[in-house]
Amino acid sequence: MADNPYIKKLIRDEVRALSAYHVPDASGYIKLDAMENPYQLPAELVDEWLDVLREVELNRYPDPGARPLKAQLRKAMQIPADMELLLGNGSDEIIQMICMALAKPGATVLAPEPGFVMYRMIALFCNMDYIGVPLHTDFSLDMDAMRAAIEEHRPAVTFLAWPNNPTGNLFSETDVMEIIEHAPGLVVLDEAYTSFAGQSFMARLGDYDNLVVMRTVSKSGLAGLRLGYLAGPAAWLNEFDKVRLPYNINILTQASAEFVLSHTDVLDAQAAKLRAARGELFTAMQAIDGIEPYPSAANFILFRTPAGQATAIFESLKAQNVLVKNMQPVGGMLADCLRVTVSTPQENTAFLTALRDSLAG
Ligand SMILES: *Cc1c(COP(=O)(O)O)cnc(C)c1O
């Protein structure tokens, strides 16, 4: 009820001012809006997986420490042996745990923009200050602006998505290292797209006291499981672990992820196919008059459309059954931009056909 008298009195102003994170209903569409991997597990692996699930004891709480899954992750993802591991219900929950632990009154979250929206949202949920530092128009880090903002706001935590979402580029390694070295607080390197970038800071974890590396299995084929992980020094992760709810990784996710991560060759082969498809899609988009795709190290491509037409093109794609992400409402550097997830050759072709049609109209 809009006029319920409790709401205005009790709910925090900044929460009332929010609109809930909007996820469009995608049923029936070719879904290219959320960076999902389009490939399923091969049928024989599905059978093996179902055998694993048959043994799961749904009447029992999950292992609160998720020990077998962590051991499997360590092996599959080359986590340095002297680093600790923390699991989240998606990496979104890890961002939330980090912010909850750091949310002293007046504490600041800093991130480059355009960037991943959950950094700002979760900072707000936790009553932290948020500073977004604009990127250069080529989406590289504006190091003068980053240095100045870090100096002025002394952030408790700086988030860097590497590659960045929604722009798709990898920031220069030198710039990232300079930020880690100069930041007075924690730096979270968000490697959600590492399997498409083929690069990582994981091996450098020991070099810095204030660096942690965050990843997710969502973009590499397991979005439905909701599993993210954070690797870093035990001193940090032991504190974050205190604000973690005891059973945050459910028993089906633990069993399923442990199983699939013992078959990383399957996920690796899918990522390799998507990397090849990304190159082909990029070239095909470059050849379309009026479309300017940005180079991507992730499994999506941000592209600029003719001025003032992004929403019309988005709607035209949708009318042709293709759902992408409209970045026009974000405005600023992303005005006139749409973002498309790299998918199977068939779906990429369907997207290209629809895109050409939307421009002709
Ligand atoms: C998708 C995404 C995430 C969130 O992933 P989940 O594990 O599904 O919560 C985190 N960071 C970036 C940059 C992303 O694009």
Image (cartoon, rainbow, N blue to C red):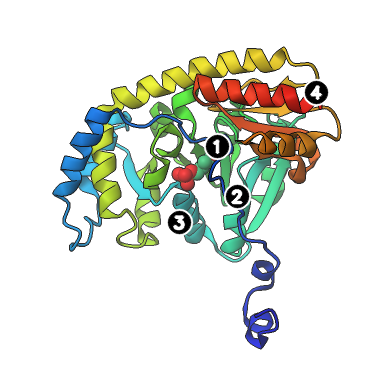
Q: Nearer the viewer, residue 251 or 341?
A: 341
Residue pictured at 49% horizontal, 51% vertical: 95
Q: Amino acid at mark 1?
A: Lys
Q: Amino acid at mark 3?
A: Met
- Spatial CA distance of label 4 from label 2 is 26 Å
Give the CA distance from mark 4 to mark 1: 22 Å
Q: Earlier in the sequence, mark 4 or mark 3?
A: 3
- Which residue corresponds to mark 3? 97
Foreground mark, 4 or 1, reads 4
Kindly check if marks 4 and 1 are in contact, taking CB atoms under 8 A apart as contact: no
Rendering coords of residue 302 (x, y %) = 67, 29
Q: Mark 2 vs mark 1: which is more N-terminal?
A: 2
Does 128 sit left or right of 113 as displayed?
left
Give the image location of residue 345, x and y in percent: 51, 19
Q: Secondary structure at mark 1?
A: strand
Task: Please name the residue that numbered disc 1 is placed on.
Answer: 31
**Quarter assignment of residue 161:** top right
Callouts 4 and 2 close, C-beta under 8 Å: no
Disc 1: CA contacts within 10 A as few (<14), some (14-19) or many (>=20) = many
Does 155 sit left or right of 242 as displayed? right
Q: Secondary structure at mark 4?
A: helix
Mark toward the start of the polypeptide (4 vs 1): 1
Residue 282 in view here:
yes
Q: Which residue is mark 2?
A: 24
Q: CA distance from mark 1 to mark 3?
A: 30 Å
Do the residues under discs 4 and 3 have CB atoms within 8 angstroms?
no
As drawn, the label of residue 360 is 4
| Nearer-the-camera pick, 54 or 16 | 54
Tell me the kind of residue under disc 2. Pro
